[in-house]
Image (cartoon, rainbow, N blue to C red):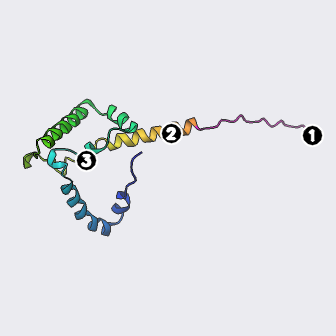
Amino acid sequence: MSAPSLAPFILKRPWLQKFVSPLAKWYVNAAGYRQLGLRADDLIPEENNTVQLALKRLPPKEAYDRVFRLRRAFQLSVAHQLLPKAEWTKPEEDTPYLTEAIQTVEAEMKEREDLEAMVITKRQRIAKVAH
């Protein structure tokens, strides 16, 4: 299951958003994944069954791009290098591509659990009594 998020709470409050936004930008830059050409959804661990199903649902181009980014980041990490600044992932390119698929899979799994847990009872007929 995906982790709970404070984002909706923060986005509903403009004053809080103004306060947290610079801190969030600093954190993303400090994390360093963009300097390796990765996107935020590339960091989601794959060991989860939900994530595995979501990865299978990615379009072929997106799946190929993801594997390319991960392999390139691994090679850069082994070589203790960063990409040239022109090749870093830009904030506008760092859009979620896997999160929506994960949420869809989670919703389907919850629906399946609800349907499997459903108890069906037979209605009893009420006989009409003539007076």
> What distance separates the C-alpha of mark 2 from that of mark 3?
28 Å
Q: Position of residue 37 (x, y in %)?
A: 16, 44
Which SS class for mark 2? helix
Within the magenta stretch, is there residue 118? yes
75, 124: nearer the viewer: 75
47, 88: nearer the viewer: 47
Circle nearer the viewer, 2 or 3:
3
**79 left or right, relative to 14:** left
Residue stretch in magenta: 117-131
Circle nearer the viewer, 2 or 1:
2
Disc 2 crowd, CA 10 A, few/some/many (<14, 14-19, 20+): few
Circle nearer the viewer, 1 or 3:
3
Q: Residue at x 23, y 58 (%)?
A: 27
Q: Position of residue 15 (x, y in %)?
A: 31, 69
Q: Amino acid at mark 1?
A: His
Relative to residue 34, is residue 48 depicted above or below?
above
Q: Which residue position holds label 3?
A: 40
28, 80: nearer the viewer: 80
**52 left or right, relative to 37:** right
Please tell me the numbered disc located at residue 27: none
8, 4: nearer the viewer: 4
Q: Which residue position holds label 2?
A: 111
What is the quadrant of residue 118 in the picture? Answer: top right
Sequence-wise, which precedes: disc 2 or disc 3?
Answer: 3
> What distance separates the C-alpha of mark 1 from that of mark 3?
74 Å
Q: Amino acid at mark 2?
A: Glu
Identify the image quadrant of the N terminus. Answer: top left
Please tell me the numbered disc located at residue 131: 1
Sequence-wise, which precedes: disc 2 or disc 1?
Answer: 2
Which SS class for mark 3? helix
Q: Position of residue 119 (x, y in %)?
A: 64, 37
